[in-house]
Amino acid sequence: MHDSMPLPLAMLIVFGSAKLLSELFERCKQPGIVGEILAGALIGPSVLGWIHPNDTLKALSDLGVMFLLFGVGLEVKASELLKVGGKATLVATIGVIVPFFAGWGILLAWGAPQVEAIFVGAAMVATSVGITASVLSGRGLLHEIASKIILAAAVIDDVLGLIVLAVVSAIARGRINFWEIALTAALATGFTVLMAVWGTTALNRLLPHFQSRARADDAKFHIALVLLFALALLAQYTGVAAIVGAFLAGLALTDGADARVRTLTRGVSELLVPFFLVGIGLNLNVRVFRSKSILALALLILAAAVVTKLVGCGLGALSLGWENVLKVGLGMVPRGEVGMVVAQIGLGLSVISSEVYAVVVFMVVATTLVTPLLLKLAFRSPQPLPAS
Amino acid sequence: MHDSMPLPLAMLIVFGSAKLLSELFERCKQPGIVGEILAGALIGPSVLGWIHPNDTLKALSDLGVMFLLFGVGLEVKASELLKVGGKATLVATIGVIVPFFAGWGILLAWGAPQVEAIFVGAAMVATSVGITASVLSGRGLLHEIASKIILAAAVIDDVLGLIVLAVVSAIARGRINFWEIALTAALATGFTVLMAVWGTTALNRLLPHFQSRARADDAKFHIALVLLFALALLAQYTGVAAIVGAFLAGLALTDGADARVRTLTRGVSELLVPFFLVGIGLNLNVRVFRSKSILALALLILAAAVVTKLVGCGLGALSLGWENVLKVGLGMVPRGEVGMVVAQIGLGLSVISSEVYAVVVFMVVATTLVTPLLLKLAFRSPQPLPAS
């Protein structure tokens, strides 16, 4: 029945509720993005049941986060990210190890079998930078050193997360092929490094040829979109997330894109990003927490998810002072689809129970909800005295 | 299998092929829009089979044409359309009667049963203004008197088409409820007239209140989008096409929208309109024309579809001189989804054969293909001597 809902109605409910709650949250001096995610929880199956996840909403959500990361890439220079590359690698690496062992340990202590514990640990590994990027970009903070480390570390984290996913899937299947995993890792790393290092240079040489010859109005924007989809696809083929490809496409175009291309991109983002945020909220299902034991586990895992990234990633940024430790640590907290995918694979292989799956989904949604609130506090500090 | 195609791949194929063929056509001094429709035929099931119609592509296509008409509405003043209202009503009415009888007559002469002939006649009635609007807007011709008559007549045509659809469905079901049809007609007419006459005034009073209070960046654009989806939905509920609602939303915002709102809207259109154009081409299936008799019928129906709108709508614009007769007549030639919907209803009720259904789909696609080519010739005349 919901699939036959008229398209304008679905658009109106999702977009309208997102912007309404965003506005309400802003008026209560809270981040609008939290309102948009909660709008998804509200209109979704968990509360009102007006909107159910379907293929079209998923596609709009996926496009939304691609355009979000593409837009963020446009605002950042690849060279500046490469400068913080060493530090970002440290941040990403410690930030992968600590949450993994925390999730694994908690599940073992809770009495779960070894394989289930490994899967939950793996599901806690991958940062999803969409939420943080949206907050930083919306508040004009992308040029702070902490923001650059977060962005670079998120890309590296994605490659590491891919390797963890490959290893964990192999463990579940009972046989580990080291060559296969090494190849996956090499491909993903190669693509990412290649694009980050030479993407801008290559495009700066190629683009003028295309643009001077194209007949269409806004041909620059068309070329930018083709590059966006092509790199998102390549990223997906090499194993990293499509949004990493989208971000790298934006990075490569930082010099080449003019104000008009940025505004046109912004138009698409303004329409589609709410679908990404609402899509997160739609996944929340609070009804599974009838058992107190599961609720306790969910809260424990959530606390661990926040604290381990905060400490792990923060440690990597220790040389930049306590303020940046807090910013970088918090910026890396949100988990995303990769965590849910790991849990889904576990569920499909019957090594994860449906309750533990719900706990992972709750952790993913809750980390995206708390991050904007915490980031607001952490990035308040440019003023010498914190405003009340 | 095709539904599990990665989203970036589908986006890349559809958007990339559309822009590539558009560019090729422009270089051959042909309308780019024809290239984009043919791109759909090329990548679709008929030739390469890379892309098959699915829910997501349908949604992107529907959004594309909504944003196209919304953008066109933003460029036109409601008051100027109302000024040509009388003439547009005449254009729309004759342009509905002539094609209906032509389609009906041809099918009867071809030996089809009475009900099938009525359905084909009905399928030839409704103009779809998307293609014409795209050509006129792309070439900066929206302010010509012929363009305004086309836009106003297309809206009226849509209401008339709705009434024809209601009558034909009733005939097929075997019982005609005049009150029901009158109610449908009254609702659709009421909504359209109300929005066209008072929409701008109402919004000019309401918008400043909302905008001065909203906290978000680009709140104007958010309000515009909510209005777009709300009116598209209302239009659909009252029975007219969602794109008529989208057009009326644009009209109502002509005064209220600033340059930034227009550019942000343009960004969305640039991304999504190719999905609308490719979507038309995807429907083309040339393989059904193995029988010479069906091919002959298809060409005859196509010729009738072009000539009847050209003559019928042209007649209505006779007082404006021959040049405008040609422009208005040609601008009203493209048929769209409503024609296919009529044929689908007939197919569902088994009063239309699958061959005749294919003929209607061919007529719809072919009228959209020939119109841009013919419009290019008709709107060339501002120069005193036609360029070679």
Image: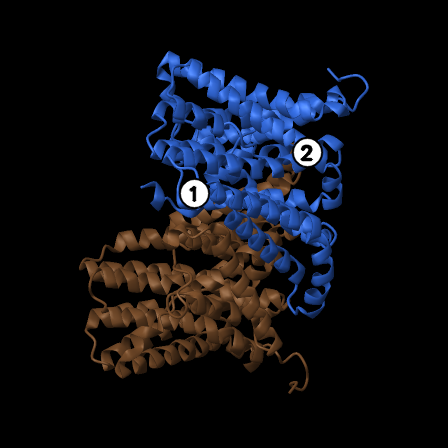
Chain colours: A blue, B brown
The disc, 2 or 1, on the residue closer to the chain's N-terminal end is: 1
The residues tagged by marks 2 and 1 sit, at their Cα atoms, a distance apart of: 43 Å
Give amino acid for label 2. Ala
| Quadrant housing the C terminus of chain A | top right
**Label 2 element class:** helix
Specify whether residue A240 is in view. no
- In this rendering, is residue B284 above or below B234? below
Instruction: Using the image, name the chain to which the residue with label 2 belongs.
Output: A
Assess disc 2: are there few (<14), some (14-19) or many (≥20) residues with their C-alpha within 10 Å of its C-alpha: many
Q: Which residue is mark 2?
A: A88
| Quadrant housing the N terminus of chain A | top left
- For the residue pair B89 and A291, the one nearer the viewer reads as A291
For image coordinates 44% across by 54% down, the residue present is: B57
**Label 1 element class:** helix
For image coordinates 63% across by 80% down, the residue present is: B381
Q: Which residue is mark 1?
A: A9
- In this rendering, is residue B64 above or below B365? above
Is there one chain holding both mark 2 and mark 1? yes
For image coordinates 71% across by 67% down, the residue present is: A209
- In this rendering, is residue B215 above or below B65? above
Describe residue B161's horizontal placement relative to residue A313 as left or right. Answer: left
- For the residue pair B134 and B9, the one nearer the viewer reads as B9
- Residue B146 lies, in percent from the top left, at 57, 71
Taking the view exactly as shown, the residue that stands out farthest to the right is A384
- Residue B87 lies, in percent from the top left, at 50, 68
Comparing labels 2 and 1, the label whose residue is closer to the camera = 2
- In this rendering, is residue A110 above or below B119? above
Give amino acid for label 1. Leu
